[in-house]
Image (cartoon, rainbow, N blue to C red):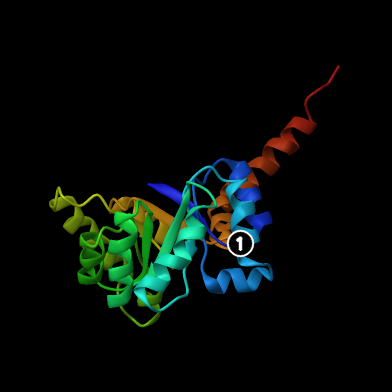
Amino acid sequence: MKLFIDTAIVDEIREVNDMGVICGVTTNPSLIAKSGRKFEDVVKEITTIVDGPISAEVTAKDPDEMVEQAKPLAAIHPNIIIKIPFNKEGLMACKKMTALGIKTNVTLIFSAAQALLAAKAGATYVSPFLGRLDDIGRDGMMLIEEIVDIFDADPTINTEIIAASIRNPIHVIDAARVGCDIATVPYKVIMQMLNHPLTTSGIAQFDKDWATVPKN
């Protein structure tokens, strides 16, 4: 399973990219707003850091307006993926963008039926939000597993699945276990994945033992 980072904070992207663990980035209007920077400037800078898919979301509501908004974004760099919210208009825009050779990520997926429709509309990626389902007492990972099974059973579907709305390292591991293509992970969760108390104590013990070794 591939790992993307879900953020618009360039310093976080650069730090995690330097670790060699991510191969893509997802952003959304909320994340861009938190960055406090101009949308296009953030996207352009990200393309200079990560050599992989970078999702940038359109905000228009009309299908044709979504396409027109997507064109200059897609022209920024070949790695740009246009994020489209799942609804009827989004599916129509997805079909149009696919015909133009623009790669898409249909987001805010909360059911296997929605994921299937997005795939049939030509989506390059679908993003089911497992954490938000967990938040309302539903099993988000079951949704990921359902979509994986459906896509694996249909040889005409080439759409990749991005497990989104990741809340903790367990979400990442469970998504990998069920065969999800990608997990897009917040910076905080990636930092949590780094840490284990036995690793920390083990390094401390190695350092302590090394200090007792004669150096001359």
Instruction: Please tell me whether mark 1 sits on a helix, a strand or a loop.
Output: helix
Percent coordinates x, y for residue 87 in the rendering? 30, 76
Quadrant of the image occupied by residue 44: bottom right
Which of these two is toward me, 120 or 93?
A: 93
Please name the residue that numbered disc 1 is placed on. 40
- Looking at the rendered structure, the kind of residue marked 1 is Glu
User: How many other residues sit within 10 Å of disc 1, few (<14), some (14-19) or many (≥20)?
Assistant: some
Whether residue 188 can be seen here: yes
As drawn, is 22 to the left or to the right of 89?
A: right
Quadrant of the image occupied by residue 42: bottom right
As drawn, is 147 to the left or to the right of 191?
A: left
Residue 127 sits above or below residue 133 on the image: above
Percent coordinates x, y for residue 77 in the rendering? 52, 48
Residue positioned most to the top: 216
Whether residue 87 can be seen here: no
Image quarter of the C terminus:
top right
Residue 38 sits above or below residue 76 on the image: below
As drawn, is 39 to the left or to the right of 151?
A: right
Q: Residue at x 21, y 67 (%)?
A: 117
As drawn, is 44 to the left or to the right of 129?
A: right
Residue positioned most to the right: 216
Residue 144 sits above or below residue 200 on the image: below
Which of these two is toward me, 7 or 28?
A: 28
Quadrant of the image occupied by residue 171: bottom left
Percent coordinates x, y for residue 157 in the rendering? 20, 52
Q: Residue at x 38, y 60 (%)?
A: 105
Q: Residue at x 47, y 55 (%)?
A: 74
